[in-house]
Image (cartoon, rainbow, N blue to C red):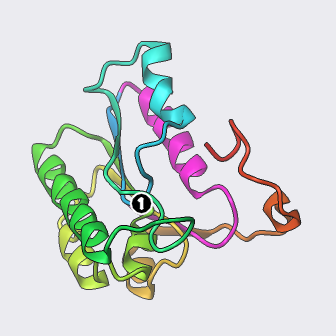
Amino acid sequence: MIIVFTGNGKGKTTASLGQMVRVLGRGKAALMIQFIKGPWLSGEDEFAAKVNIPPEKFAVRKMGLGFVGILGDALPIEKHKEAARHALDEFIEEKRSGRWHLMILDEVNVAVSLGLLTPAEVIAAVDDFPEEKILIMSGRGAPQEFIDRADLATEMREIKHPFAKGERAKFTVEF
């Protein structure tokens, strides 16, 4: 099953993590590969160690280099493209291993909308995803090709967010 979580509202990564909890509760393994998020720690990074889940059952791999072209990012776009390509290669390798019941490509939609990857590259990578397993593709701006390929697609729509009033990201809400 392929699921797409997209839209400009908050909750795409959070919904993906909720699905991870469900999968873990059923004794299955779950992997999240993050395409944009950089090296800073968030709650999901600390979760597994605190609840004593072994890395072969639950893993979050931050493979992005952080924000692209905003908030002080000075890296050349080629570096971001290399990181996204490496993340996609990691997904392909882990998909072939068969170890994970759930795989999440967190912010892959953003990587595509920023031109770090093409929709065709990602579709080629996910095209043979096993039917009995779950793949989530998250992030704003999902291309139509991803929505067409998905079995389930959900759009998160922002109605109200503190950021609109100039408030910064909140600990335990955004990270």
Q: Nearer the viewer, residue 39 or 93?
A: 39
172 vs 55: above or below: below
Q: Position of residue 159 (x, y in %)?
A: 84, 69
Question: In the image, is residue 6 part of the stretch drawn in magenta?
Answer: yes
The reply, left or right, for residue 49 in relation to residue 156 is: left
33 vs 69: above or below: above
The reply, left or right, for residue 160 in relation to residue 46 is: right
Q: Position of residue 29 (x, y in %)?
A: 32, 33
Residue 66, by quadrant, is bottom left
The reply, left or right, for residue 165 in relation to residue 158 is: right
71 vs 17: above or below: below
156 vs 62: above or below: below
Dot 1 lies on which element?
A: loop
Q: Residues within 10 Å of mark 1 (few under 14, many from 20)?
A: many
Q: Nearer the viewer, residue 27 or 94?
A: 94
Magenta stretch bounds: 1-27
Q: Position of residue 171 (x, y in %)?
A: 69, 38
Q: Nearer the viewer, residue 120 or 83?
A: 83
Label 1 sits on what residue type? Ile
Query: What residue do we see at 44% from left, 70% from top?
Result: 68
In which quadrant is the C terminus drawn? top right
Residue 116, by quadrant, is bottom left
Residue 130 appears anywhere in the view: no
Residue 127 appears anywhere in the view: yes
Query: What residue do we see at 65% from left, 55% from top?
Result: 11
In which quadrant is the N terminus drawn? bottom left
Query: What residue do we see at 68% from left, 59% from top?
Result: 10
Q: Position of residue 67 (x, y in %)?
A: 48, 63
Q: Nearer the viewer, residue 147 or 113?
A: 113
Residue 80, by quadrant, is bottom left
Question: Residue at label 1?
Answer: 36
